[in-house]
Image (cartoon, rainbow, N blue to C red):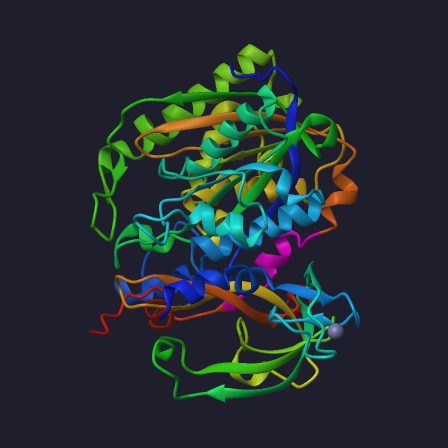
Amino acid sequence: MLKPDRDVGIVGYGAYVPRYRLPASEVTRIWNDGAGGAPVKEKAVAGLDEDTVTMSIEAARNALDRARIDPQEIRAVWVGSESHPYAVKPTSTIVAEAIGATPNVQAADLEFACKAGSEAIVAGIGIVGSGMGRYVLAIGMDTAQGRPGDALEYTAASGGAAFLVGPAEESVAVYEATLSHVTDTPDFWRRAYVHYPSHGHRFTGEPAYFEHITRAARQLMAELGAQPADYTYAVFHQPNTKFPQRVGQMLGFTSDQIEAGLLAPVIGNTYAGSSLIGLTAILDEAQPGDRIFMVSFGSGAGSDAFSLRVTDRLIERRARAPLTRDYIARRVEIDYATYARYRHKLQMK
Amino acid sequence: MSIPRNWRTRQQRYSLKAEVCNTCGNTIFPPRDVCPHCAEQKQSWTNLSGRGEVYSYTTMYNAPSGFEEYTPYTMALVKLSEGPMLTAQLTDVDGNGVAIGMPVEMVTRKLTQDGDEGQILYGYKFRPLLRQAV
Ligand SMILES: [Zn+2]
């Protein structure tokens, strides 16, 4: 497992969910004659003027509002996403400029399908834990797209979260350790210049999602000498409603432990933001002393597992910015036609 | 779209970076060489709260070039709590939900883009206060 020399934690956190919701029944209505079940109730959809840059800026501002630190002390801004607005030109420099963290700062965009955000957190733990920098802003944010009519269209959603990683003695939750499990697995990919992703059907469930999450989770708990019962909360990557419920069950977590962080039913799969925004919803209600277990998953494939312990600083700090459920409650339902317009699925020229 | 001009103004556009006049104390936005209130030249940088209220507004059905994809949208005169008045697009509003005096907050959004290959321009817009928008 990975454990830095100096103890590191989350000094501030912030979520973002856009206000539009596409009910799964709209996708079913258009593509399946209204018949059949759906993997989520509805998903969050970004508006016309939103993208990974704008959503990252708002989540980052929420994290800074909670942390109340000087943004000039941030030594890295890393944005994990598979929907960076530019193919070449970093999202992270725009975010860093908007929050006042430029110019003496590392800035880079990370890619690892849905694991890019947690990858940024692990890298941030390294910078802070080595003493190279006091704070790192790690963001997982996406405006995910599915091919019209594809199963992913029910779930591919917009949203994510930002975490200001810093010294444990200033943190609302402290990282006890982290551990990753990564292999070359052909479950899901998108080639350059191609608009929509492809998936290796046979590979998406068992050898990818369940294999990587359970291996990372079991190994981390074993090395920490921890049991599922030691944790008040657990959160996993959420490509739909059932996968995180099932993987939690496989690992021995109860539905009570995963309920607070399970947002996929009402916002969909926010890809690089998925497990991260689940963690923000948990921090919105956790109590000092609670332990939180988090495991991300990214296709290609890999999982990062984290063990966290909540400190008494959380109570005061969480009230300083909107709660994740404030964003979820800010809900404007749209139909498939509006969705097609907002997500640029109409060819205008 | 002027790339040099957009670059020079990025901080005021992204985060309402403003100035306070060292002589008369008024807040100045956008930043400029001479204070519009007392004509003195010495100013200091400041960060605005981003809070304000709608002073007046109009709905655009015919947009200027580069903004067509957003129609209809609402342009407003926003009076910031620190004093300055500025013109900005309202976002996260539906046509009938806007009123004079409505409290708003700044968000950074996409303003326009230079076709499919040019740069994307980000900047401030205003939306109803999040916690009241529920
Ligand atoms: Zn003056």
A154 above or below B86? above
Q: Is residue A47 left or right of residue A200?
A: right
Q: Give the quadrant of the N terminus of chain B.
A: bottom left
Q: Quadrant of residue B103?
A: bottom right
Q: Residue at x 66, y 68 (%)?
A: B129
Residue nearer the viewer, B106 or A59: B106
> Can residue A261 be seen by looking at this rendering?
no
Q: Position of residue A35 (x, y in %)?
A: 31, 61
Residue nearer the viewer, A325 or A104: A104
Tell which quarter ligand 1 is in: bottom right
Q: Position of residue B17 (x, y in %)?
A: 62, 61
Q: Residue at x 40, y 21 (%)?
A: A181
Residue nearer the viewer, A60 or B122: B122
Q: Give the quadrant of the C terminus of chain B.
A: bottom right
Number of marks in the image? 0
Range of the magenta residues? A321-332
Q: Is residue A146 left or right of residue A250?
A: left
Q: Quadrant of residue A58?
A: bottom right
Q: Residue at x 23, y 74 (%)?
A: A348
Q: Position of residue A126 (x, y in %)?
A: 53, 23
Residue nearer the viewer, A318 or A60: A60
> Can residue B55 be seen by looking at this rendering?
yes
Q: Is residue B23 magenta?
A: no
Q: Is residue A283 left or right of residue B94?
A: right
A205 above or below B69? above
Q: Position of residue A345 (x, y in %)?
A: 28, 65
A24 above or below A103? below
